[in-house]
Image (cartoon, rainbow, N blue to C red):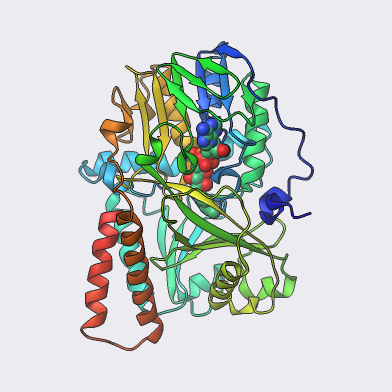
Amino acid sequence: MHNDALCNFWTSTLGERPPARPRLTAHLQADVAIVGAGFTGLWTAYYLKRLSPALNIVVLEAERVGHGASGRNGGWVVGNLAGLERHIGGLSLDERRLCCGVVADNVDELGGVLAREGIDADFHKGGAIYAAARYRDQVAIQRGYLQHLHDLGHRETDCCWLDAGQLAEKARFRDGYGGIYHRQVATVNPARLVTGLAECAERLGVTIHEHSRAEILERRKVSTGEGSVEAPTIVCATEGYADGFHDFKRHVLPVQSLVVATEPLSESVWQEIGMAERPAFSDASRLINYGHRTADGRIVFGARGSYRLGARSKADQAIGEAAMRMRRDLLVDLLPALEGVRITHGWGGSLGLSRNFRPHAILDRRHGLATAGGYAGEGVAASHLFGRTLADMILERDTELARMPWAFADASHRQLIKRWEIEPLRWLAAQAITFSYAGEEALMRRGKPLPLIKPALQRMNDYFASVIE
Ligand SMILES: Cc1cc2nc3c(=O)[nH]c(=O)nc-3n(C[C@H](O)[C@H](O)[C@H](O)COP(=O)(O)OP(=O)(O)OC[C@H]3O[C@@H](n4cnc5c(N)ncnc54)[C@H](O)[C@@H]3O)c2cc1C
């Protein structure tokens, strides 16, 4: 029988999962009710309980723990936030440096909690390489990105330039011209992280109900088909999986991302491509690609997100042959030594994209409703930071995290996040942008100067990027 979950390499490492936790069948009172057992919901529960052990916290999960993006992602733990410049662009350099320090240090904080709590999720801090790995034109792109990181306030010791020789010491790509090395990036096995975190939260006294889809959200009450939880604070932690629940999807849309895993590579292949320190890697492309060397010697590689008409989130995990082949070909183009290597797993899921193109942690005190998300594909580390921030805000702790520019108290998600445009406008815009990005990449591949077309396309794509990043 086809087991959809086993298409996902991470899930396949979990072994046989225990039976599902009981569904919610009663009418409960709690201090905090959390909808969604992914990283955001579970980190919020964890920090609430650590800070205030007497709290009664109930988590409702529509499927199983980690059903959403948290159990399916590429495993990068990034010391940055997608859309950070939208939060801090107008601040002074000192303030920006402080914010960048918080997001960079969050990687070590996350690793520290895993070690303290005994959560074995293969956390490994090998940094990340943002390479110019295929075309000479990519050098300027990556140099510009490094400047952007420094201008934003990231520490020069965290993000530095590697010339071709230094890059080759870390990883050997097809045409490694150089790249950025970002020290504050780690990798994890996300399925182990999310299941280990759920068990840890339960040990602290958090109650989790699986197969308990929240259907109705009223003031300070959330109901499934069979039960309900009344609580002064309800946290909506559904990111790219909010389908049909309240109006969150009007503000945070699901975008698909697909990933493949190779078989474990032989020692001779590793000798050829390097990566002895197990760095995460990515190659300059607006169409996004990212990978890393896993603990058991495979490469997990994701690329080319896409948007589905009507903003449907991806419930199943399996992806088609063509989607796997396309990612395999791109991986081999980056690392030709992988020619002939077998792809053993291919899966996908949905991440959440906010209409403001920046992530948020929001507590609407008046309505007792909190939410965090909009991580735009960089949610593994961010959900730890934002879950912790929500816990501080809910407990009214005046902390540095609660004062960060992405933390909003006393306003609603409706006031703070714009609504997405209606279809087919969203779909048409997504198609146009993808087409244009692909055109730019095709020109880079061609490698010849095209005096009018190339700069015009680049300017248009810079504009798209400034609008959506
Ligand atoms: C393929 C892929 C690759 C990615 N790669 C990376 C990466 O390498 N690095 C990175 O930083 N980020 C990555 N991301 C993004 C990252 O995984 C997410 O941003 C993050 O996991 C979001 O966590 P979350 O808890 O907010 O949401 P999710 O993990 O999506 O959890 C939401 C949960 O809510 C549940 N739910 C939804 N509706 C209801 C309801 N009505 N009632 C009860 N439960 C409900 C869902 O079942 C789900 O379990 C990737 C995402 C994808 C899809």
Q: Residue at x 63, y 36 (%)?
A: 65
Quarter of the image containing the N terminus? bottom right
| Between 460 and 148, the one nearer to me in the picture | 460
Q: Is residue 469 visible?
A: no
Q: Is residue 111 visible?
A: yes
**Is 48 situated above or below 443?**
above
Asked whether, in this view, residue 116 is left or right of residue 374, the answer is right
Q: What percent of the width, then of the height, locates residue 7?
A: 68, 56
Q: What percent of the width, then of the height, locates residue 133?
A: 47, 74
Q: Residue at x 56, y 51 (%)?
A: 73
Number of numbered discs visible in the structure rendering: 0
Asked whether, in this view, residue 221 is left or right of residue 420, the answer is right
Asked whether, in this view, residue 26 is left or right of residue 450, the answer is right
Q: Residue at x 53, y 28 (%)?
A: 214
| Between 132 and 315, the one nearer to me in the picture | 315
Q: What percent of the width, then of the height, locates residue 130?
A: 45, 64
Quarter of the image containing the C terminus? bottom left
Q: What percent of the width, then of the height, locates residue 33?
A: 51, 21
**Is 183 situated above or below 175?**
above
